Image (spheres, helix red, strand yellow):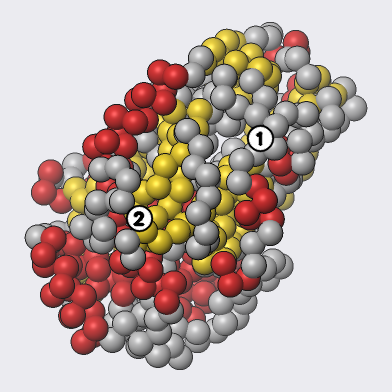
Amino acid sequence: APFSNYEGRSPASGAQSSMSSQSVSPTNLLFLKSAFCLEGAFMSTDDIVQWLAEQNQKVTVNVRPCPLREIQGWHYDETMGRIQHDTGKFFSIDGISVCTNWNGPAEWQQPIINQPEVGFLGIITKEFNGVLHFLLQAKIEPGNIHYVQLSPTLQATRSNYTQVHKGRKPLYLDYFRNAKPSQVLLDQLQSEQGGRFLRKRNRNIIIKIDEDIQVYDQFTWLTLGQIKALMQRNNLLNMDTRTVISGIAYGNYSPAVIGLVDFLARDHELRPIKHAILKSALSPVGAKHSIETIISFLTHLKSMYDLDVERIPLTSLSDWVFEEMVIRHRDDRYFRVIAVDVEIGNREVVMWSQPMVEPAQEGLFAFVVKEIDGLLHFAVQAKLECGNHDMVEFAPTVQCLTGDERQTGSQALPFLDYVLSARPEQILFDTMQSEEGGRFYREQNRYAIVMADESLPDQLPDRYVWMTLNQLHYFIQFNNYLNIQARSLVAAISFT
């Protein structure tokens, strides 16, 4: 059954059970080949790291705090009770009151980013030497750690690309506006952080071109394998690149073809776990649960619980303090709303001011994975967040703030102890990754994938379900199923 009140495409009931075990498009093969290619046609992965450092040195960046009620171009709207841009565009900082019967706090109030515009997160691709390359940008955002990070070819809100700021038009915009259907390799609406944004979504799109184009100074071509290799390092790929890359699927293959791919991949000296990941990504059969069972699992939760979100003035928020320089929780938990004056030399607008959300602590987002009946499965939780477009989305096994962990105790959160006590040989992925630097000020969180041993039972707590990587790829192609934290982890998974 499709989700109630669901916008956009919905996976049909029984869709995966009716799939052919051999369901592969030319696009799937382009992506898969690029994912195995660790050497690009232009720069080595190490050269890209050096190039990013050089890009950082080229540009003047100044980010300075300023009083909340004195942000140039912004004001506190007494009628609406929110901080908003003078044009009414871009975004606003609103207050909300939340009521839910989901387990946990039944009622709370908080500030939230209200950005109803659907922005572009777009990547241009082109084949070089028979391998698909992705055009990424060394982009500076005011909240980025180390400032320069690899972003999509185009990263722009509607207010940006319609030039409300009266700055330059974003580079490469017309390639996306004028793309023919045959050029589009991926096109999705995806959510952002449900605890910080109010029903925010962006258009994630990948297009393919054949003609030569001008590559500007702060842009470069990378293979998918190089992109994933860079995700193994801290804070090099921004959140927007990760969400676009997460939508890439590689097709459904028969066991014989998976065996062939596995055999050919041995030239890369893959560890056994990489073979398990490859099989979990490519096999449409053998999962513990069918697609229709997983849909029913989520639909049942949505039918059982309620989420009411009401906008209220920022100055009326209980447990929050509105000061000259900051809006903060009275216990200094969760996050703070601050304001900054920004100067960045290579942007469409080089000077501006804006509110930002600053974290009070780092977070931990982790998948626990386990082989079940010979196929790698991911323990996925259904998680309600106040800003979700459709109330509940699939999230990593563990998703928490470290401050909450210290105050509530790790025993209160399923699998948290398991992740924190994992042995080095169990850790498949473990890096610090930045969140969206255009709205969040120097926020980084720990992202990890942990391999379970035999001591972990197959039985999961309520609101958790086992899914293969192939099933995760299947659900990502539809709107509002996997949250941004889960998608960031999926994006980081590599076959090499």
Instruction: Name the residue carrying label 1.
Output: 112
Q: Nearer the viewer, residue 1 or 209?
A: 209
Q: Nearer the viewer, residue 448 or 295?
A: 448
Q: Residue at x 29, y 29 (%)?
A: 50
Based on the displayed image, in which of its 4 quarters is residue 130 positioned?
A: bottom left
Q: Residue at x 52, y 74 (%)?
A: 295
Instruction: Name the residue carrying label 2.
Output: 224
In this view, 384 is above or below 322: below
In this view, 463 is above or below 222: below
Q: CA distance from mark 2 to mark 1?
A: 34 Å
Answer yes or no: do the residues labelled 2 and 1 have beta carbons within 8 Å? Answer: no
Image coordinates of residue 354 in percent, x first then y, are 67, 22
Q: Residues within 10 Å of mark 1 (few under 14, many from 20)?
A: many
The secondary element bearing badge 2 is classed as helix
The secondary element bearing badge 1 is classed as strand
Image coordinates of residue 10 in percent, x first then y, are 61, 74
Q: Residue at x 15, y 51 (%)?
A: 426
Left or right: 271 as drawn, with respect to 54: left
Based on the displayed image, in which of its 4 quarters is residue 420 positioned?
A: top left
In this view, 198 is above or below 298: above
Mark before the other along the chain sequence, 2 or 1: 1
Q: Residue at x 45, y 24 (%)?
A: 147
Q: Amino acid at mark 2?
A: Leu
